[in-house]
């Protein structure tokens, strides 16, 4: 696998057989818009590509439910408080509701849930400990009750995003308490938002953490002092990830903290989507307009993750029709129910495996990968059974559910989930009973590493 490393600004060979992967998750004060979700789709394609290469992935994602201000620096309105005011709820209610909404969205998009999803509010202790490490190392200062990270003490601060002094000044709002404009808050005790619900006791007084510290603290807590891959949107590069890198390497005493930094590009619309303007598109918006969430997933496959994705309703409609045609063709293939590994592929079919792996391993070239899939489906020199097997295998990365019926009855899914639980508990008698019941209702269930698929 060769992947583009934002840190070195080159493609590099990824060698490790195990992957410690950290991805910046949502701030749960509102629904995720489809621009946010493009980043999580790119990360899902990355994880699936690691897995199809036989690598073991430990995927950690944070849930930001405290400390994120609207400017992404240290100014603006507290996002959680803003959500609570908007809806007349407590910040805790807002966090719970929009965390569940986010999980619903990624399930609809067939994004694999992370191995570990960790809330900032559940890890205050780890954040305080990391700030204390920075304090002991001489990397902090206090002004008006707030604890700041002193970026002048980290001489590689500008390297990750290739920042100039002018750009560092332009990307943050002025704060007279800061020694340098790019310094950032690690802990607030002197909040401009009054008596917030989310506050904790700390060595510096009662308050709450800044946004950036949570990712460093939770990443090291779950993944140790070295991370193989750290992902996020391109908007995180110059502020959030730059700050994460600085505080982590100073606190942990390691270099490099992250081996590969990877960033997904923006979704582009005629008018910038903004939650403050309430003009953003969500998965629910797409569904209400007659689209399936997988139509959007298919659409994102057509543009490389490091290129801006131009969104339009016409483009989404084209993606919808293309995905539906592809699904219909795959459903029409006659097959014996065998999976990859169960049959010996011909030389021609092996060439499809080679072409597909070459595409996905070339910095996630998904546009080329989906083209290989289309070539395979329409290749009448390949038997229908083998085409079906190859599609099932490729779809482990693409995640379009091409071998699933368009609509699986809820009763069937309920029985399949019960069977999966029985298998996990090694209750094979109940598992067999549930398999037979599913079969009596017209479906065959096949076990996979990820769970199950239907025929």
Image: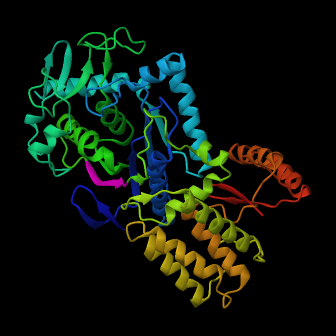
Check residue 261 for magenta coloring.
yes
Q: What is the total number of numbered labels drawn onto the structure image?
A: 0
Q: Residue at x 35, y 39 (%)?
A: 219
- Residue 341 appearing in the image: no
- Residue in front for this viewpoint, 280 or 248: 280
Q: Is residue 212 left or right of residue 442?
A: left
Q: Looking at this rendering, what residue extends furthest in the front direction?
A: 270
- Residue 142 appearing in the image: yes
Q: Is residue 255 left or right of residue 325?
A: left
Q: Quadrant of the C terminus?
A: bottom right
Q: Is residue 138 above or below residue 377?
A: above
Q: Residue at x 10, y 31 (%)?
A: 180
Overall secondary structure of the magenta section: strand
Check residue 121 for magenta coloring.
no
What is the x, y in percent for residue 288?
66, 45
- Residue in front for this viewpoint, 163 or 388: 163
- Residue in front for this viewpoint, 402 or 80: 80
Residues drawn in magenta: 258-265
What is the x, y in percent for residue 298?
56, 62
What is the x, y in percent for residue 138?
10, 27
């Amino acid at each position: 696998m060769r992947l583009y490393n934002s840190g070195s600004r080159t493609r590099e060979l990824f060698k490790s057989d195990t992957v410690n992967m950290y991805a910046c998750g949502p701030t749960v004060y509102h629904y995720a818009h489809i621009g946010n979700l493009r980043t999580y789709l790119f990360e899902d394609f990355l994880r699936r590509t690691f897995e199809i290469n036989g690598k073991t992935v430990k995927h950690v994602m944070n849930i930001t439910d405290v400390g994120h201000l609207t400017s992404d620096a240290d100014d603006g309105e507290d996002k959680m408080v803003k959500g609570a005011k908007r809806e007349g709820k407590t910040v805790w209610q807002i966090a719970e509701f929009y965390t569940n909404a986010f999980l619903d969205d990624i399930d609809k998009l067939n994004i694999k849930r992370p191995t570990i999803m960790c809330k900032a509010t559940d890890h205050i202790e780890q954040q305080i400990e990391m700030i204390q490490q920075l304090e002991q190392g001489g990397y902090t200062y206090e002004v008006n009750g707030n604890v700041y990270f002193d970026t002048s003490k980290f001489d590689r601060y500008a390297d990750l995003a290739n920042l100039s002094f002018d750009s560092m000044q332009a990307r943050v709002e002025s704060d007279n308490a800061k020694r340098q404009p790019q310094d950032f808050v690690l802990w607030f005790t002197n909040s401009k938002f009054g008596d917030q619900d989310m506050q904790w006791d700390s060595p510096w007084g009662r308050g709450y953490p800044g946004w950036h510290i949570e990712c460093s603290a939770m990443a090291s807590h779950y993944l140790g002092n070295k991370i193989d891959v750290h992902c996020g949107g391109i908007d995180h590069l110059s502020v959030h990830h730059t700050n994460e890198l600085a505080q982590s390497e100073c606190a942990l005493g390691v270099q490099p903290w992250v081996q590969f930094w990877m960033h997904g590009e923006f979704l582009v619309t005629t008018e910038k989507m903004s939650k403050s303007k309430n003009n953003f598109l969500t998965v629910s918006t797409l569904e209400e307009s007659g689209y399936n969430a997988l139509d959007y997933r298919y659409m994102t496959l057509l543009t490389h993750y490091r290129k801006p994705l131009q969104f339009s309703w016409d483009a989404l409609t084209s993606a919808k029709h293309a995905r539906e045609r592809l699904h219909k063709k795959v459903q029409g293939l006659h097959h014996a129910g065998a999976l990859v590994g169960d049959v010996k592929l011909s030389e021609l079919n092996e060439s499809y495996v080679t072409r597909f792996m070459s595409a996905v391993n070339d910095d996630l070239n998904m546009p080329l990968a989906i083209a290989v899939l289309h070539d395979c489906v329409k290749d009448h020199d390949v038997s229908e059974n083998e085409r079906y097997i190859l599609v099932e295998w490729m779809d482990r990365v693409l995640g379009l559910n091409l071998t699933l019926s368009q609509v699986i009855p809820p009763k069937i899914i309920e029985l399949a989930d019960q069977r999966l639980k029985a298998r996990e508990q090694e209750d094979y008698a109940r598992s067999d009973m549930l398999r037979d019941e599913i079969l009596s209702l017209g479906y065959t269930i096949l076990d996979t590493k990820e769970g199950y698929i239907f025929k």
